[in-house]
């Protein structure tokens, strides 16, 4: 029963990844047809991120009241509705309205499923879970590309992904009786704790340290991915085609790294995976930074950063129940998700300002700051947990 449920959870994480890469692949066409500035993509991503942060913070209360299965099914349904809304939108205002359920759905399901897997499954499954997110994130750009090159338009690309999401929603609603039976078994054997307020969760020993660790990780990951090509072209003088290929290898490195780390996660343990991952990230950043006319080190460095990033996110999530208690994990994972989205939403644009007004060559220095902050906060947490 638990094995079948794990398959359902993997499917849900594919659905979580499907919408995440659509806007970036469609926007070069969308903004021209909608007759808005290219920068307006930032407005949409901010609305989505805002909804995601809100629903992440509410995930503890929602999950305790309705259960993980119901929250997951309704959240995926909300993203399906939002994607269909995008497909029939012909104005930027409508897109902004549809971005609200888009973000609200994503945050709740992310926090609820991450917590469920952290509580009930081994560390390897958390790594593979985030691999399946990568599968969803990789599928949707291909669908959008086919729609655009085939002359169907960006609306059709969104519609096809919405149909996929509706199919996944149907599977999730069909699985609700299974969730109900499992919840009944768990409620007999576990004491159900009351939901924590935000202030109560923040006052738990070590929570602030893990929030800073998670914030730093997501700031580094998203900044690396967003600005890699620009750095390679503008500062390193690499041609745009080569730069784009190696920038994409950063994401492939994350997905492949999570698949591989799943095989060793249970043996090595979450704390060691986080430590090794951050050290690999730092070594990759150093390679990106090394000055000189040979740019191969920078290209290899990006791939190494991706491999280092792979185990960090899943391991932080999976270690939450053991660090802070099973009864507190849902609330803390929700706050972690919110912290992650703050880092990934605001820190890449901040580097954009630095690149415009100072020098894009500061890219590895910016990444190094977050990598060092990450390792410091992570080791302080380990020390505090040993006391």
Image (cartoon, rainbow, N blue to C red):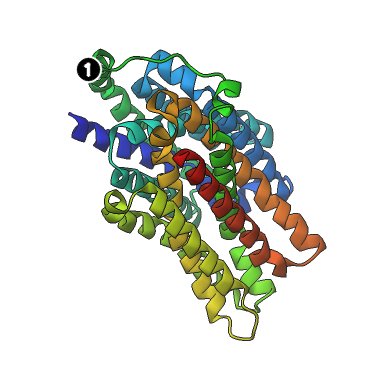
Image coordinates for residue 183, horizontal then vertical, percent = 28, 18
Q: Tell me the residue at 45%/14% (across/down).
A: 194
Q: Say which residue label 1 marks.
A: 185
Relative to the observer, which residue lies in front, 163 or 293?
Answer: 293
Q: Residue furthest front?
A: 387
Which residue is at the far right?
357
Could you say which is closer to the camera, residue 340 or residue 370?
A: 370
Q: Is residue 293 above or below residue 129?
A: below
Picture quarter with the N terminus: top left
Taking the spot 34% from the left edge, 49% from the top edge, the residue there is 269
- Whether residue 247 sits left or right of residue 185 in the image: it is right
**Disc count in the image?**
1
User: Is residue 23 in sight in this rendering?
Assistant: no
* Residue shown at 29% from the left, 17% from the top: 190
Single out the residue that lies furthest toward the bottom. Answer: 293
Res 305 seen here: yes
Q: Is residue 65 above or below residue 21?
A: above
Q: Quadrant of residue 244?
A: bottom right
- Residue 276 point in image, percent of width and height: 43, 59
Residue 240: image x %, image y %?
A: 60, 73
Q: Is residue 374 left or right of residue 168?
A: right
Badge 1: residue crowd in 10 Å (few <14, some 14–19, many ≥20): few
Image coordinates for residue 41, horizontal then vertical, percent: 66, 45
Can you tell which quarter of the image residue 122 is in? top left
Secondary element under disc 1, as helix, strand or loop, is helix
**In front here: 196 or 111?**
196
* Residue sitting at x 50%, y 30%: 332
């Amino acid at each position: 029963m638990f094995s079948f449920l794990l398959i359902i959870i993997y499917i849900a994480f594919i659905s979580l990844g499907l919408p995440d890469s659509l806007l970036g692949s469609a926007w070069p066409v969308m903004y021209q047809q909608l007759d808005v500035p290219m920068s307006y993509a930032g407005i949409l991503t901010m609305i989505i991120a805002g909804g995601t942060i809100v629903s992440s913070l509410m995930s503890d209360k929602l999950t305790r009241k309705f259960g993980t299965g119901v929250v997951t099914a309704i959240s995926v349904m909300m993203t399906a509705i939002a994607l269909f809304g995008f497909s029939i939108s012909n104005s930027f205002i409508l897109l902004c309205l549809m971005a609200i359920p888009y973000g609200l759905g994503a945050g709740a399901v992310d926090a609820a499923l991450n917590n469920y897997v952290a509580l009930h499954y081994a560390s390897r499954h958390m790594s593979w879970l985030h691999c399946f997110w990568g599968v969803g994130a990789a599928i949707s750009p291909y669908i959008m590309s086919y729609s655009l090159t085939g002359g169907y338009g960006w609306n059709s690309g969104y519609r096809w992904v919405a149909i996929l999401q509706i199919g996944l929603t149907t599977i999730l609603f069909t699985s609700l009786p299974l969730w109900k039976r499992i919840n009944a078994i768990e409620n007999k054997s576990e004491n159900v704790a009351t939901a924590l307020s935000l202030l109560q969760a923040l006052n738990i020993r070590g929570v602030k340290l893990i929030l800073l660790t998670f914030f730093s990780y997501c700031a580094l990951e998203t900044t690396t991915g967003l600005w890699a090509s620009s750095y390679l072209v503008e500062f390193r003088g690499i041609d745009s085609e080569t730069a784009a290929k190696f920038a994409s290898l950063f994401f492939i490195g994350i997905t492949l790294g999570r698949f591989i780390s799943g095989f060793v996660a249970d043996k090595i343990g979450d704390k060691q995976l986080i430590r090794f991952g951050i050290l690999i990230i730092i070594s990759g950043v150093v390679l990106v930074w090394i000055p000189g006319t040979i740019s191969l080190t920078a290209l290899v460095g990006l791939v190494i950063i991706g491999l280092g990033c792979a185990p960090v996110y899943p391991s932080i999530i999976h270690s939450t129940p053991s660090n802070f208690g099973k009864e507190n994990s849902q609330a803390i994972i929700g706050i972690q998700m919110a912290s992650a989205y703050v880092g990934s939403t605001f820190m890449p644009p901040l580097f954009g300002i630095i690149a415009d007004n100072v020098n894009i060559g500061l890219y590895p220095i910016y990444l190094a700051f977050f990598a060092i902050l990450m390792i410091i906060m992570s080791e302080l947490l380990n020390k505090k947990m040993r006391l």
